[in-house]
Amino acid sequence: MKKVAVIMGSDSDWPVVKGACEQLESFGIPYEAHILSAHRTPDKAASFAKSARADGFGVLICAAGMAAHLAGAFAGNSTLPVIGIPMKGGAMDGLDALLATVQMPSGIPVATVAINGAKNAAFLAAQILSVSDDALAARLDDHRVKMAAQIAEKEAKLQAEL
């Protein structure tokens, strides 16, 4: 199975990004987590992105706030799917990060999840990898069944209270 790279621009992103790692673990997806900066370690970030496919990665998840150029920098240096997690904070409380992550030039896409949407980034990475992994696809299907069962239980509880 291909690995997922989980990249954050700062260690302050870890409390949110950890949710993506936990979700990847729950599906049995191998991953690596790293702190790399598009601005403070641009050569290391570019090198990682350029070698990611050869290093066994299938998807790159990048979390960054404020200027949020990390996902774009990775997308500019790799043809692997890149998922951006705009991080809450800064003067615009994450809106600047969202816009910087989603507004990419034609030909350099970044799939973007919600502000602080680390778990959905992991789900999207799993769905991308499941295209060529039937066992992972089955685990995703099972998870959807479990989510539906949880909603049915909550509905029954609500109806019992009414």
Image: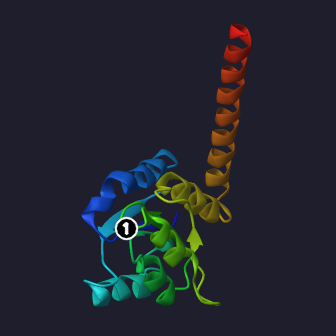
90 with respect to 98 (left or right):
left
Which one is in front, 141 or 154?
154
- 10 Å crowding of disc 1: few (<14), some (14-19), many (20+): few
**Residue drawn at x 62%, y 46% as measured from the top left:** 139
Q: Nearer the viewer, residue 1 or 50?
A: 50
Nearest the camera: 40 or 5?
40
Which residue lies under the disc numbered 1? 91
In the foreground, 154 or 136: 154
Left or right: where does residue 104 sit relative to residue 37?
right
What quarter of the picture does the C terminus occupy? Answer: top right
Colouring of the image: rainbow
Q: Amino acid at mark 1?
A: Ala
Dividing the picture into quadrants, the one containing residue 10 is bottom left
Where is residue 48 shown, x and y percent of the image?
36, 82
Q: Residue at x 42, y 88 (%)?
A: 50
Q: Residue furthest front?
A: 91
151 w.r.t. 38: above or below = above
How many discs appear? 1
Q: Is residue 136 above or below residue 75?
A: above
**Residue in the picture at 55% in, 59% down:** 114
- Residue 157 position in % (x across, y down): 67, 15
Quarter location, residue 35: bottom left
Q: Residue at x 48, y 82 (%)?
A: 72
Location of residue 125 with respect to 54 vertically, above or below: above
Q: Secondary structure at mark 1?
A: loop
Image spot of residue 5 (x, y percent): 42, 68
Find residue 63 and report its horizontal and vertical position in percent. 41, 67
